[in-house]
Image (cartoon, grey):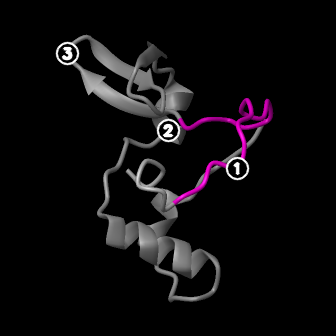
């Protein structure tokens, strides 16, 4: 949409960095609790540690995401509920 319309310019194309840990989430299914990747693909059965440490995947409005980015960089007010949107890691 933005690239095709010329609003954004492509400035490069690189492989993802090897030290980035992509988010994982838990979901409950009829056959038990599973871990899914950031695309929603089931990648394994959830361990007890997964169940304690991983969150369910959240969906928020673009406005909430905008507020989280503003707050993260000191432009807006931070709310504890925004913590669920923060990227948690690298290897």
Q: Give the quadrant of the C terminus.
A: top right
Q: Main secondary structure of the magenta part?
A: loop
**Residue at the spot of label 3:** 30
Q: Which mark is residue 52?
A: 2
Count how many numbered circles sit on residues in the image: 3
Q: Is residue 80 visible?
A: no
Task: Give the structural element (helix, strand or loop) at label 1.
Answer: loop
* Magenta residues (range): 8-23
Q: Earlier in the sequence, mark 3 or mark 1?
A: 1
Q: Position of residue 46 (x, y in %)?
A: 46, 21
Crowd class of label 2 (few under 14; some 14 to 19; many from 20; radius 10 Å): few
Q: Earlier in the sequence, mark 2 or mark 1?
A: 1
Q: Which mark is residue 11?
A: 1
Q: Quadrant of residue 33?
A: top left
Q: Position of residue 4 (x, y in %)?
A: 43, 48
Q: Is residue 39 above or below residue 64?
A: above
- Does the magenta-highlighted stretch encompass residue 45? no
Q: Is residue 49 above or below residue 41?
A: below
Frontmost residue, 59 versus 52: 59
Nearer the camera: disc 3 or disc 1: 1
Q: Are marks 2 and 1 in contact (CB under 8 Å)?
A: no
Q: Are marks 3 and 1 in contact (CB under 8 Å)?
A: no
Gap in angstroms between the C-alphas marked 3 and 1:
45 Å
For the point 31% across and 52% down, the residue is 59
Query: Going by the image, does 60 lie left or right of 66?
Result: left
């Amino acid at each position: 949409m933005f690239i095709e319309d010329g609003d954004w310019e492509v400035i490069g194309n690189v492989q993802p960095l090897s030290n980035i840990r992509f988010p994982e989430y838990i979901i409950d299914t009829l056959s038990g609790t599973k871990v899914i990747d950031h695309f929603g693909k089931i990648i394994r059965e959830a361990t007890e540690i997964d169940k304690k440490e991983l969150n369910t995947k959240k969906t928020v409005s673009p406005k909430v995401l905008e507020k989280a980015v503003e707050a993260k960089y000191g432009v807006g007010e931070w709310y504890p509920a925004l913590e669920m949107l923060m990227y948690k890691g690298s290897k």
